[in-house]
Image: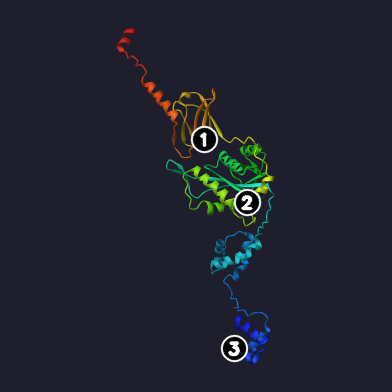
Amino acid sequence: MLNVERWAELRRLHFIDKVGVRELARRFDLHRKTVRRALRSADPPKYSRAQRPSKLDPFTDEVHRLLKDDPRLPVVRIRELLQPLGYTGGETILKRHVREVRPLFLPVRTYQRTVYLPGELAQCDLWEPRREIPVGCGQTRKGYVVTMTLGYSRLGAGTLIFSKQAPDILAGLLRCLVRIGALPRTLVWDREGALHAGGGRPTEIFAAFCGQLAIGWQFCAPRDPEAKGIVERSHGFLETSFEPARLFAGPRDFQEQLDSWYDGRANARFHRTLRARPIDRFAHEREHLRPLPEVLPDLDRRVVLRVPPQPYARVDSSDYSLDPRLVGRRVELRISPTEVSAVALDSGEVAARHERTFARHVTLTALEHARLLREQREARQHEPEVEVRALARYDALIPA
């Protein structure tokens, strides 16, 4: 059989150099009929072998029937159902055939390219780093990052949190909005349990948060990650560009490195889809964003308690010292992402102010509280001794 190179050479010699068929047959040691057939063919020669019958051929109708009943039927199960009928072929040829015919029974979902208007929305999600975050006292803890990406400019921000409770998620979300410095019209979330009350409705705390900012919300349909594909792709970038080969001293160091990465890398890179840098697109989008309100939502948790004789308050399994002079009085404990503080309800005195720790089972005692506790203990040691009288004295005074 002629290969493509020899076929091309025959046609060149005949049509350009005017070499005859007899001479071409002699030069290339070919039969004249072969030469004529090559000269008449305008298409290059192709080698084809007659397709041999497959072991699957007698069972294709049964495969189609099974797929008609259940278009998502796995190939492994199809093979199990075919074997009692006499199928002895392998799984590879069955997979190849099912891959070709399954779209005939299962409608393929298509996606249209979405174009976002400036200031229209921001997609939000939670990203979980692979490694736990050092939190001090030799401990590490699983962390989560609240991520936000603007739809038009792709400008992003992230905040580290340590729980999926609504106050922590919303505190991280508010910090992302503050980092961006403006408000979009709508926040797009998946059905996060702390924010979604079911049926596309927000939880009360999330609705209050959006109401205070005068911002809209939108929940994606179940099992529809493509609806917020922009922020999902940013998670892939976090996993390949931010997290590898980084060490963190603690939560504060993690947050500082994350902010620097967003400012210097994620938001300053050339975006292939946009053909521009997010920071440059944001300069235009900022004109369509609303400014942050002067008073931001208060997301701190508050607990009212009475200072116990052992003056400590427990937050997230760790104990924080309170002013021992306020034992027995009621105080309001205020828990923010960075601080734990307490104020006496009757007088407004500051009962405690501690930097919040995310280590577990740790006791934090302020130096002033430790000094007051020591002074109270020393005062008790110098109290006057009480006379202990003999029991015979009481027997003499009390008649039998």
Residue 371 percent coordinates (x, y): 42, 27
* Marker disc for residue 28: 3
| For residue 17, above or below residue 100 | below
User: Label 2: how many residues lie within 10 Å, few (<14), some (14-19) or many (20+)?
Assistant: many
Among the two numbered marks 1 and 3 on one chain, the one whose residue lies closer to the N terminus? 3
Identify the residue at horizontal 40%, vertical 24% (top origin). 375
Helix or strand or loop: what does disc 3 sit on? helix
Judged left or right of residue 212, residue 372 is left
Helix or strand or loop: what does disc 1 sit on? strand
| For residue 44, above or below residue 154 | below
* Marker disc for residue 278: 2
Judged left or right of residue 195, residue 380 is left
User: Label 1: how many residues lie within 10 Å, few (<14), some (14-19) or many (20+)?
Assistant: few
Residue 351 percent coordinates (x, y): 50, 27
The amino acid at mark 3 is: Phe
Which one is closest to the eye, mark 2 or mark 1?
A: 2
Q: Is residue 143 visible?
A: no
Residue that numbered label 1 is attached to? 339
Kindly report the distance in space between the C-alpha atoms of the residues bearing marks 2 and 1: 33 Å
| For residue 383, above or below residue 214 | above
Identify the residue at horizontal 52%, vertical 29% (top origin). 342
Given residues 263 and 176, the one toward you in this image is 263
Count of numbered marks = 3
Given residues 148 and 180, the one toward you in this image is 180
Residue 340 percent coordinates (x, y): 51, 33
